Amino acid sequence: QVRLVESGGGLVQAGGSLRLSCAASAISRINVMGWHRQAPGKQRELVAVSSSGGTTNYADSVKGRFTISRDNAKNTVYLQMNSLKPEDTAVYYCYLAQVGVQAWGQGTQVTVSS
């Protein structure tokens, strides 16, 4: 059974940085992993995704500030978040998609104070 374990959320001032990590278990070699977020009163939205083949995609709102990376040997995906803004405040969810499976992590809170 696929399992995703997130870490790295927290409270940071505007302009600061945070790094999220998501370790996956029981996954296939070919997959897409990434991050979505959900702010209070808003729908969950894609932040960044990365395929096992190396393709990445970002939401326009985070381009140039966030970087997704992965260590396939460790089945781990990272999200480096720089120049954080108060509007980045949300619960961030790790995401995995592979043949026959979609999975979500439990979520980690990111709060950016102004």
Image (cartoon, rainbow, N blue to C red):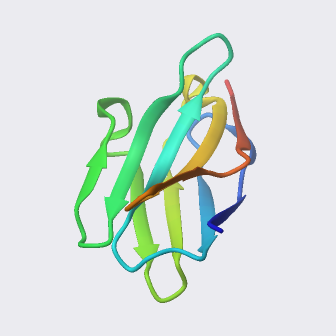
At horizontal 32% and vertical 72% (from top left) the residue drawn is 52
Q: Could you say where residue 10 lies in the image, as x and y percent from the top left?
A: 76, 46
Residue 20 placement: quadrant: bottom right
Please give the count of numbered marks on the rendered protein.
0
Compared across the picture, whether 63 is left or right of 76 comes to: left
Residue sitting nearer the eye, 96 or 113? 96
Q: Could you say where residue 23 lies in the image, as x and y percent from the top left?
A: 63, 71
At horizontal 73% and vertical 48% (from top left) the residue drawn is 106
Q: Is residue 66 above or below residue 91?
A: below
Residue 84 visible (yes or no): no
Q: Could you say where residue 68 lies in the image, as x and y percent from the top left?
A: 41, 59
At horizontal 43% and vertical 40% (from top left) the residue drawn is 47
Residue sitting nearer the eye, 95 or 66? 95
Residue most toward the top?
41
Q: Is residue 69 above or below residue 91?
A: below
Compared across the picture, whether 99 is left or right of 8 comes to: left
Q: Quadrant of the C terminus?
A: top right
Compared across the picture, whether 101 is left or right of 108 comes to: left
Residue most toward the bottom?
73
Q: Quadrant of the N terminus?
A: bottom right
